[in-house]
Every structure is written in C-alpha cells, then in structure tokens.
C-alpha cells in the first residue's frame, strides 16, 4: 500500500450515517449552535441563576456542567445552582502559574476545593453562573483551557504523568500533546475565545509544525467532514465523547484498555519514536437495567509507524464521526460500533476510506503495571519530583494551602495522575530537604508508604453535586476502605485489593476494571463487580445487582475466606476468575444467607 501522504487525498469520503435520516433534537441543537456558540452566549449575560437545557448542552463543550447542590435542596425553594468546571491538561501537566491561578479562583469564586480527576485534569466546583466568564477567562489568560474537557468531542488526552527524561516517556508526553492539539476543534476554538476572552485570538492553541501539516489533511479524503471551517468534526461534532491515551511499554497508569484509542509507544534507545501498538473501542459507561449498554475493553488494531500516528488518530475519529450512532445516545460510543460490526470491519473500513498507511501486527509488549510514582524520584540531572497520594483527588483545607505555598515558593510544576494523585515536579537538589520538611508538616513524611487499599482506590464525586449520582461515593470511600481493611486483617489477608467506587453506572472512576467494584444502584445500595486485575488488564464481571452497603462485610467474607484458604497467592481478581461464577455465587449467597443471589448476566 502506498505510504505517501498524497495518497490520503485519493480516498473518497464515505456517506454520512445521517445523510438520509432526520437528525435528532440533540444533533440539531449542535447544528444550530454556530459552532458551539448559541444559545450559550445569549444566556451568559442574563440575570437567571441557571442556563436553559440547550445552553447546558453547549456549555459542556466549553468544559463545564451545570449542577445543583442536593444537600441544599429545600421544597419550594430555588435550587442551589452552580457550575463544575474542568480543565484541559494533556498528560496531567499543570504549569505553576496556572495552578496558582486556579487555586485562587477555587477559593474566591468556587467552593474552596480542587479535584484531580481520573483523566488527569483539575475540576473546580461551586462556581456561580455570573462568575463563570471571569473564571474561564482567567484560566485562558494563564495559558490554560477548558475547551473540549466535556461534550461530544475528544476529551483530555492521557499519558504517564511522571516527568522522567528517559526512555520513551518524553516522546509519549509529546505525542499526547500533539494529539490534543490536533483534535482541538478549529471553529469551536474561535467560539470559545469569543465567549470567554472577547475574541482575543492570541490565546488560540498553537500546534507544532508537524501537527499543522497533519491538520491540513483534515480537508482531504474521508477525513474531511464537508465543513471547511470545522474540517474534522463538522457542524455536529461527534456522536458522543471520545477518549485517547498514550503510554510506554509496561506502564499501564493510564488504564489503556478503557480508551476509545489506546497507544503504546515504542522508541529506539535514544528515545526517538518508532511506532505504536494501537487499541480501539474501550469504554466504561453503561446504564442500569439496559443490557444493550455495557463496559468494554479495547481490541488490538495493530502496529503503526510513528510518522503516521497522527493521521491514524484523526482517521479513527473521522470514522466514528461518520458511523457512530447519532439516534440513540446510549449506543453512540465507538465501543458499540466495534462491538456490533467487529474490529475486522472497523480496520477494513478505516483503510478503505480514511487511512492509507500500513497497519502491521502488534509488537510484543511487557506485562503492564499500574504505576503510581508515589514518593521521591529522580526527574533528570539535578531535578526531582515527588508523588503525593490524594484519596479521591480532593484538595482542600490545610493540604491545599500547603501545596500552594510549595508551588509558589519553589516555582514547581504540578502533574496529575490517572490515579488522582499529585506530583510536584522540578524540585532542585538543593531544595529537596526544605520540600521534605514542608511535606512532613502536611502529613507526607513517607508518601510512598500510603495505606495499601487506599493507594490505588478511586471514587467519583457523586453526591451532592453530580446530577447522575444515585448514592454516595467520594464522601464515603474512606469509611468503606477502612471497613474492607478490617475485614482483610480479620481473615489474615495481607495482599491488597484494587477497589473502585461510583455513585452511578456511568463509570467515571472506571469501576469495571477493579477487583472489587462498587457501582451505585440505589440509596446506600451498590452493584458488586468482581474479577478485574491489579494491572487493569481484564474487565470485571457483575455479580450482585443490589447489595446494601451495610451488608458489605457479610457478603464478601466467605469469598475472602475461600481466597485465603486457597493460599491467597494469586490476586483476588484472578482467584474469582479461576474459581468461576457458580463457586463465587455460592460464596456470596452464603454470606447473604440466601440460596439464590441476585446476579446479573455476563457482559456481551
């Protein structure tokens, strides 16, 4: 197959899936928005405390969700409307100046906290509508962005957060930055700047020359949407959200198989990019009692040379743009397209109409590990970084104030991990002892020695702010981990277990990859998922549809006893998988003292 870039132009654009169908209300809203401007702009300056439904949907593309604080709901009274704001931080990198700006904004115009997300970005909560322009405008003027942090568009691009200047890490970070720039919507970026900084174009994202060259090919062949002002996305953008992650061989800090596109970058001994193993079609979101929705891990697509990677990424996005389901939003993610039609069809369609370069068999990879980078590490000659565990990523109070002081005093850079932890970077050798003392005063005497269960546990924000939450997650995670730790100790189990918890089935904390996943299904009730792996390489299975949180110990104890009785040498997830569903169902039933546990069907 011809590998030249000119061959990209010779392909013909497949017919749009929407070409013969009446667009849905949501698709029409995007079409009528003027590239994501209205009705948001028209409502931003009015005196209402909240936005209309249409403006809310467009606001998401600008990085914000409208919420109300359910703790403050009173019958007959106006809801406590506020905005959650999410930043765009490829690879989790937050320069010191930007960090100090959002820290100050959170105190002055938010609820006083910052939160590191599972996609390596900061979230702010509690911003009122009348302050939204000041908050986003300040972020932009500090060279940050919230564009594409939410909405039917490419989300924050993930990469290993560690600032190592060795191996493939620098090239992986650069690739993540390039992908983020490449997939930035061009017309929508203009709308974004019009709304939040009064059209000041000097803040436009400035891609590298290599990215500009690939972006120019968005006007060619199947990649072209038909809209020259928004050549990749078109007027209706994507059917649903789209997620990309880059990593290096052996480092699975990014939860690679949960992404729409997962890239494992191989480099030569000098750190020059050679190519990537490519995985497609992962995704965590699902809906209770809707069996047609499910969590899914990505399929291997093949190996692609480094010079063609950016073309590949925008080609895959264009294929999903054209073939993703725009009628049923529950069925709109790329994972359903690949599940329904198969990865062989996907690869054939990709090469027939979008991507003209070779896709070779996968290269062999080492077994992945969930890296977290906690503790002290050498960054490069004369520089260090330190990883700090932050349960659920929530920065508040003394910890938040202390980190601000450290960043301001030592001119540090902040990086966020997919595990919701914080790395303080660019610490000079002469500064190490002072930083150590300051961290010890904040409770981080030995940050690498955090409690085993808490080390990799995740929870979504859930109540009181998330409109989708049906029960608690973040606020009760510490108590849940304490209960589980007591249960493990009581049964003589020293191995740790990967635990993830969400307040609804949408999967923001990726609970379906955990060894124990607790997924909110009612007030103080959770689906129980078991069988994931400590290195995030296998999807868990649903076992109980509604487990009362009060029954956590009695439900799990027979299973843990059986694991310990078998020697406890394998991980809990492996033990569950090897034991099989009938045995695990029996242990759970024994704990609940029932003969027929409420179990769910296996995933498709």
Image (cartoon, helix red, strand yellow):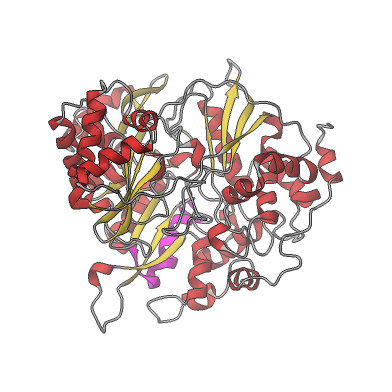
| Left or right relative to 341: residue 8 | right
Please identify the quarter of the rendering in which residue 404 is found: top left
Vertical relation: 52 (above or below) 391 = below
Q: Position of residue 415 (x, y in %)?
A: 40, 38
| Left or right relative to 414: residue 69 | left
Task: Give the residue drawn at x 42%, y 30%.
Answer: 162
Q: Residue furthest bottom?
A: 76
Vertical relation: 212 (above or below) 571 = below
Examine the residues drawn in magenta and state their main secondary structure: helix
Q: Position of residue 146 (x, y in %)?
A: 48, 55
Vertical relation: 39 (above or below) 333 = below
Vertical relation: 190 (above or below) 160 = below
| Residue 191 vs residue 155, the one in the foreground | 155
| Left or right relative to 355: residue 343 | left
Residue 134 drawn in magenta = yes
Q: Which residues are magenta?
A: 126-146
**In which quadrant of the rendered image does the N terminus lie?**
top right
| Residue 402 vs residue 91, the one in the foreground | 91
The count of marks equals 0
Q: Position of residue 539 (x, y in %)?
A: 44, 38
Q: Position of residue 287 (x, y in %)?
A: 44, 58
| Residue 255 vs residue 519, the one in the foreground | 519
Residue 164 drawn in magenta = no
């Amino acid at each position: 197959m011809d590998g030249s870039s000119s061959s990209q132009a010779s392909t013909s654009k497949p017919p749009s899936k929407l070409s013969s169908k009446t667009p849905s209300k949501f698709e029409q809203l995007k079409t009528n928005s003027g590239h994501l401007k209205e009705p948001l702009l028209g409502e931003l300056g009015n005196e209402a405390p909240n936005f209309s439904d249409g403006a809310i949907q467009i606001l998401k593309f600008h990085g914000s969700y409208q919420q109300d604080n359910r703790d403050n709901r009173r019958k007959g009274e106006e809801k406590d409307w506020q905005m959650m704001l999410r930043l765009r931080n490829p690879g989790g990198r937050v320069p010191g100046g930007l960090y100090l700006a959002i820290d100050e904004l959170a105190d002055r115009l938010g609820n006083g906290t910052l939160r590191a997300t599972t996609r390596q970005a900061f979230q702010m909560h509690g911003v009122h509508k009348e302050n939204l322009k000041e908050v986003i405008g300040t972020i932009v003027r500090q060279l940050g962005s919230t564009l594409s942090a939410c909405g039917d568009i490419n989300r924050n691009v993930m990469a290993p957060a560690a600032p190592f200047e060795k191996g493939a890490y620098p090239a992986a970070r650069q690739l993540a930055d390039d992908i983020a720039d490449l997939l930035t919507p061009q017309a929508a970026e203009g709308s974004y700047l019009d709304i939040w900084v009064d059209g000041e174009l000097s803040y436009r994202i400035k891609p590298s020359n290599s990215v500009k060259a690939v972006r120019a090919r968005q006007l060619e062949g199947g990649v072209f949407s038909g809209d020259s002002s928004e050549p990749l996305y078109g007027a209706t953008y994507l059917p649903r959200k789209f997620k990309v992650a880059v990593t290096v061989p052996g480092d699975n800090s990014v939860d690679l198989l949960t992404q729409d596109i997962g890239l494992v970058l191989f480099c030569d001994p000098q750190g020059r990019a050679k190519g990537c193993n490519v995985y497609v079609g992962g995704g965590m979101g699902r809906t209770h009692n809707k069996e047609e929705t499910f969590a899914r891990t990505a399929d291997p697509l093949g190996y692609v040379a480094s010079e063609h990677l950016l073309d590949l990424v925008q080609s895959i996005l264009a294929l999903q743009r054209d073939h993703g389901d725009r009628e049923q939003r529950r069925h709109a993610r790329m994972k359903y397209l690949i599940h329904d039609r198969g990865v062989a069809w996907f690869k054939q369609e990709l090469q027939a109409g979008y991507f003209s370069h070779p896709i070779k068999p996968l290269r062999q990879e080492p077994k992945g590990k969930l890296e977290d980078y906690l503790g002290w590490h050498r960054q490069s000659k004369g520089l260090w970084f330190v990883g700090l565990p932050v349960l659920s990523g929530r920065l508040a109070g003394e910890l938040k104030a202390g980190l601000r002081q450290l960043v301001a005093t030592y001119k540090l850079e902040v990086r966020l991990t997919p595990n919701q932890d914080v790395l303080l970077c660019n610490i000079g050798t002469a500064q190490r002892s002072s930083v150590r003392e300051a961290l010890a005063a904040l409770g981080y005497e030995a940050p690498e020695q955090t409690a085993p269960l808490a080390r990799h546990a995740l929870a979504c924000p859930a109540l009181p702010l998330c409109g989708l939450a049906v029960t608690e997650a973040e606020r009760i995670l510490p108590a849940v981990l304490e209960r589980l730790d007591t249960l493990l100790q009581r049964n003589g189990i020293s191995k740790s277990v990967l635990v993830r918890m969400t307040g609804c089935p949408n999967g923001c904390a990726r609970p379906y990859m955990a060894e124990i996943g607790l997924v909110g299904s009612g007030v103080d009730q959770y689906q129980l998922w078991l069988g994931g792996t400590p290195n995030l390489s296998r999807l868990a299975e649903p076992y109980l549809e509604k487990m009362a949180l009060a029954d956590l110990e009695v439900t799990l104890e027979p299973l843990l006893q059986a694991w310990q009785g078998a020697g406890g040498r394998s991980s809990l997830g492996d033990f569950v998988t090897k034991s099989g569903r009938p045995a695990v169902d029996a242990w759970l039933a024994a704990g609940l003292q029932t003969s027929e546990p409420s179990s769910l069907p296996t995933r498709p």
